[in-house]
Amino acid sequence: MSSNKSVKMSEEEIDKALEKAEKEAEKKDHKKIWMDKMMKSAKTYYKVCPYYDKKTSKCFLSLSSKCNRDGKYENCPVFLDFLDNKYKEFTSKKKILPLDFLDLAQSV
Ligand code: SF4
């Protein structure tokens, strides 16, 4: 009778679930804010994607795949994935997240 399960949740359980959901939402917000900041910062330095090879139209981030966006990186899923992974990398190592795109790009 799994449908009764939620009804049987104690107040404490509900509080815990809410707290967990709030923390998750906070994490997502934090990541989104940081990714937006990085995108904005990148745009102050680069008109065309820094990972776009103009000569060959290849994308340095997606190993030798062609960039089909002419280096327009705003909302590019590959670029966003890169930021997402960087965020995870920094937070999992408990390192301070860079606030400038150049610092991020130079980080290993
Ligand atoms: S696919 Fe995205 S990340 Fe790769 S070069 Fe093109 S715009 Fe840049």
Image (cartoon, rainbow, N blue to C red):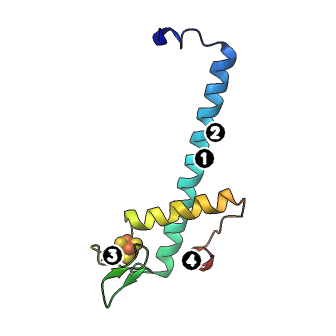
Residue at point 50%, 77% (across, down):
44
CB contact under 8 Å: marks 2 and 3? no
Q: Tag 3 or tag 2, which sits nearer the N-term? A: 2
Which structural element holds mark 1? helix
Circle 3 residues within 10 Å: few <14, some 14–19, many ≥20: few
Residue at point 56%, 77% (across, down):
105
Q: Amino acid at mark 4?
A: Ala
CB contact under 8 Å: marks 3 and 4? no
Residue most toward the bottom?
55
Q: Tag 4 or tag 3, which sits nearer the N-term? A: 3
Picture disc at residue 65: 3
Residue at point 56%, 48% (across, down):
29
Of labels 3 and 1, the one closer to you: 3
Q: Amino acid at mark 1?
A: Lys
Q: Quadrant of residue 86?
A: bottom right
Picture disc at residue 38: none
> Position of 16 compared to 78: left or right?
right
Query: Which residue lies under the disc numbered 2?
Result: 23
Query: Which residue lies under the disc numbered 4?
Result: 105
Q: CA distance from mark 4 to mark 2?
A: 28 Å
Q: Which quarter of the rendering shows the C terminus?
A: bottom right
Picture disc at residue 27: 1
Q: Is residue 101 above or below residue 10?
A: below
The percent coordinates of residue 90 (x first, y second) are: 65, 62
